[in-house]
Every structure is written in structure tokens, then in C-alpha cells.
Image: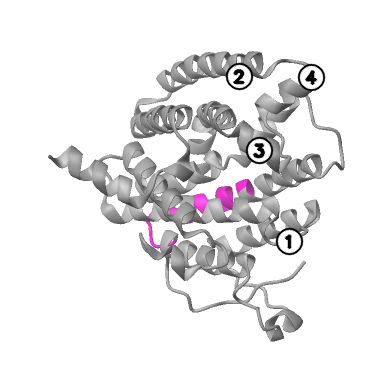
Amino acid sequence: MPSWRPRSTPYPRWSGCCAYASLFADGNSAASRLAFSCLSAAATFPHARREQIADLGALSTILFGVDDITDNLAGDWTDRDIVVLFGDLASVLSGAPLAVDAAAGAAADAGTRPVDEAMAAWQSWCARLRRYDGAGAYLPILAAQLERTGEAMARERVWATGGEPWPAYEEYLPHAAVTFLYHTWWLAALAICGPAPADAAAVWRSIEQVTDLGAACLRLANDVRTFQRERHEGKPNAVLILEGAGTSTEAAVERVTAHIRRLNAEFAEAIAGLPDGLAWVADGQYRCVTFSGGWYMARDTHAYTVRDLAADADAHRG
């Protein structure tokens, strides 16, 4: 797998996806993702400072790009390549320099490949993350979560490329909830929007069940929205897995939708059980799942543009 090298590309601003022309080659799609990412962050933390919303929105956009790479944007990657990628993301998060491969560095396209651009954007974002008071406490947990995500994405890659038969629904969901990157996003949100904790591991243990449930809710809602597109891409999806087991498309969608309703109820119950000191997390997780889950069930993220976001903001102010 090719390595990456540092670039001087600036931190991606709200409209800065064009700075990463290989990673976000489709400008309209990138703008849609950026608009949704910032809107979702604002819906989750309506009282956060603008820079906090921008950093969380930028994180989501970078993670969209990383997910594209694992879906073969970077070429014929193996499951092992994905594990290595996420290991390097974890290393850069912890302050390690970007790895440099001399042969890759001499190549004409070095630094402009999707993986180069993703790592450069990630390095810039991590530098911003480390400025927050709570970041130091959460960095080791976030690094471990990234490595866990890499293992889960690698497994999905094996399924998608036919290396192993697709899993049963019950086996798929725990992997898919992790690869949705909700856990990763929330660990960053704890550092960005929360106070510096006395015991970050204890905080994470307290909310891990809630986060598992929230991730499952959103993964399934996303699967209902995207199964037709993912059918053509050959990717595992909850609806498609049920179809493969002999269920009709209509019945599969209804079964997944019913499961979302049950998970939403479990999620609400788990949120109610969080301690008072984590009330801001309970509120944020509820807002996040309610907003994003409703969004996925109603529209495609790729169809919402920055212009739509501006028009909605004007209408709201009016």
C-alpha cells in the first residue's frame, strides 16, 4: 500500500473541500456532506461555539473521505491496507508525524492522492483538537477506537469483495455500528464540547452503551436510505442481507424500520439512566440521533447542498 507524506494544505474551512481535489473529487457531493456535517453538529450542540461546530463538521467531512477510501476510492486496497490506514490515523492523532515512503515521495502524484489528502487533512484537524482542554484525556481512547474501527472496516471489506460470505443480520449490525463512526465522532465531541475529565475512561464507560445504541439506530436508518445505491456497489447492508436470506425488499425495509423503532426506545431508556453530571451528553446524544435518524429516513445526505443550508438558515431567521 502506498504511504503518504505531509502537505502544506491548510485546515479545511467551511467551503474548503476544493483544497482536497482527489479526496473530494465530486465538488457537489462534498459540499452536500459538508453542509450536512455542520448542520448535524449544530443540531447536536445548539449552544456550542462556532469554532466547535466547525471542528466537528470538519471531522465528519474528513471521516466521509476516509470512508470513501476504504470503499476503494484509493484503488484495490485489501483488508490489511485498511487496518494499516486506521493505525496510522491513530498514530497521527497521538502526535506522530506522517509516515513518508521515499519511493512514494518521488512519485509525480505523491501528496495528491486521496489517501495523502486525507492524512494531511487529518493531521491539521488533530492539531486543532489538541488545543481543547479535554483532548489529552480522550486521545488514547479515541486512538483505540480508531484501531477498532479499522478492524471492523477491514472485515466489511472482506465481505464486500467476496472473501467471505455476507454475514447474518445479527452478526452484521455490531460491525456496521462501529464502522458508522458514531463512536469516533462522539469521543471527539467529548473532548471538544465537554470539560476536561478527571477520568476520561470512566466517562466513556458510562456512555458506551448509549453510544452503541445510538450508532445502531443511525446505521440502520442510513441502510434504509442507501440500500439501492449500495446494491450497485456490492456493499453489505442490513436490507440487502435480509433480501439475501429470502425476504422481499418491502418486508426487509419494514423489518429494519421496526428494529429502528425498538432501538430508539432502548436508546431513550439508556439516556434516561445517565448520571446527572452527563446531562449535556444525554441531551447531545438524543439530539444527534433524533436529528440524523430523521434526516436519513427523509432524504439523502448527498442531495443537500450548501445553498440549501443557506436558504434554510435564511428561512429560519426570517
Predominant SS of the magenta segment: helix
Q: Which mark is residue 253?
A: 2
Which kind of residue does numbered mark 2 sit on?
Answer: Val
Give the residues drawn in magenta, as a range.
Answer: 130-145
Q: Going 54% across and 77% down the picture, which residue do you hit?
A: 7
Q: Is residue 130 left or right of residue 223?
A: left
Which kind of residue does numbered mark 1 sit on?
Answer: Gly
Task: Determine whether the residue tagged by mark 3 lies in a helix, strand or loop.
Answer: helix
Residue 237 within the segment the image draws in magenta:
no
Q: Which callout, 2 or 3, points at the residue further toward the start of the chain?
A: 3
Q: Is the residue 225 above or below the residue 160 in the image?
A: above
Q: Which mark is residue 202?
A: none
Frontmost residue, 182 versus 273: 182
Quadrant including the N terminus: bottom right
Q: Going 54% across and 40% down the picture, which residue do you hit?
A: 183
- Residue placed under numbered mark 1 in the picture: 75
The residues tagged by marks 4 and 2 sit, at their Cα atoms, a distance apart of: 13 Å
Q: Which callout, 2 or 1, points at the residue further toward the start of the chain?
A: 1
Residue 137 within the segment the image draws in magenta:
yes
Task: Determine whether the residue tagged by mark 1 lies in a helix, strand or loop.
Answer: loop
- Residue placed under numbered mark 3 in the picture: 230
